[in-house]
Image (cartoon, grey):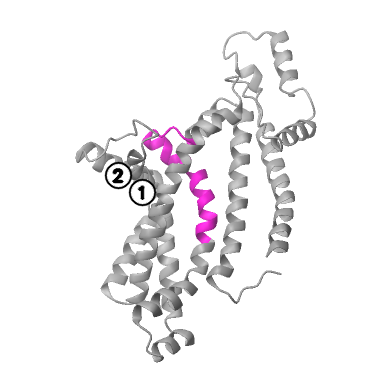
Amino acid sequence: MGRYVARRLLQMIPVFVGTTLLIFLMVYSLPGDPVRALWGDRPADPQAMARLKHEYWLDRPVLEQYWHYISNVFTGDFGTSFVTGRKVVDVMSEVFPVTIRLALVAFTIEIVVGLVLGLVSGLNRGKIYDKLVLVITLLLVSIPIFVLGFIAQTVFGNQLGWVTPTVQDSNDITQLILPGIILGSLSFAYVARLSRTSIAENLRADYVRTAVAKGLPRRRVIGVHLLRNSLIPVVTFLGTDLGALMGGAIVTEGIFNVHGIGNTLYRSINQSDNTTVVGIVTVLVIVYLVSSLVVDLLYAVLDPRIRYV
């Protein structure tokens, strides 16, 4: 296990460097001069522009800029925004906790609702409940997330008055429940369908028939034998989806006025604040890589036959 984890961590280094290099090249290759954009329609001061470019390494070749950036990242320095003058790590420390709370609300709903729907649907395959779950999840998969968000905002916020249409305090987790449901709706539809299919297939497996023939209680057959083996494809999806939830929060945060990483990323792109954009995306890449590692380690917990070599 230790050697496997060490090897996976070493494998993550080139993936991290390659991904961040690609992102860096894409962001810094965009047309337009971000420093000149600071002056807007006003005439720019050439000396001030030259000073800013030199200070932020923008007058160097792009690969040299990347090396300077990635070297500082390993020391915890994600650079300084030339739009706001603030350290990017300070900006992220303010907005990341908000998005993490939103993503955890969505993730919890995704696991609980998705697995319950999938379990009951898989155990009752072909019955009316199964068909109802398939219709609901198909609707959730078919409706774009921004349409679902506006519908929920109009119905539950403006018409019924159950919640405020937009989030007033991003640090209040109770106000993040509706955005969390919308953010996790697509994912729990996938989780429900994945777990339904896996459970329905494993119901016919030899080990389940053997457990039933041995006279084990139904709760033990489902909880220990059936559900545990059926969770492997679901866990794979959940692991990659945690990072996707944080990256995909940009739409949900915009609809519900949540001051998290999505809003900050959208604003930074509009302002050509490349340092902040690259810093945020770099952290999201790390979240993806760590999530992937945790998923791989969970495989052996769910299925002891899996060995790490």
In the rendered image, residue 294, in percent from the top left (x then y), is placed at 58, 58
Among numbered discs 2 and 1, the one appearing first in the sequence: 2
Element assignment for label 1:
helix
- In the picture of the structure, the residue carrying the numbered disc 2 is 152
Q: Is residue 239 inside the magenta stretch? A: yes
In the rendered image, residue 141, in percent from the top left (x then y), is placed at 40, 57
| Quadrant in the picture for the C terminus | bottom right
In the rendered image, residue 232, in percent from the top left (x then y), is placed at 52, 68
Element assignment for label 2:
helix
- In the picture of the structure, the residue carrying the numbered disc 1 is 181
Which of the pair 160/11 is nearer the observer? 11
Query: The residue under label 2 is which amino acid type?
Result: Ala
Q: Is residue 248 inside the magenta stretch? A: yes
Q: Quadrant of residue 135?
A: bottom left
Dots 2 and 1: beta carbons under 8 Å?
yes
Q: Residue at x 41, y 58 (%)?
A: 111
Residue range in magenta is 237-262
Name the chief secondary structure element in magenta.
helix
Q: Residue at x 33, y 38 (%)?
A: 175
* 246 over 48 or under it: above or below: below
Query: The residue under label 1 is which amino acid type?
Result: Ile
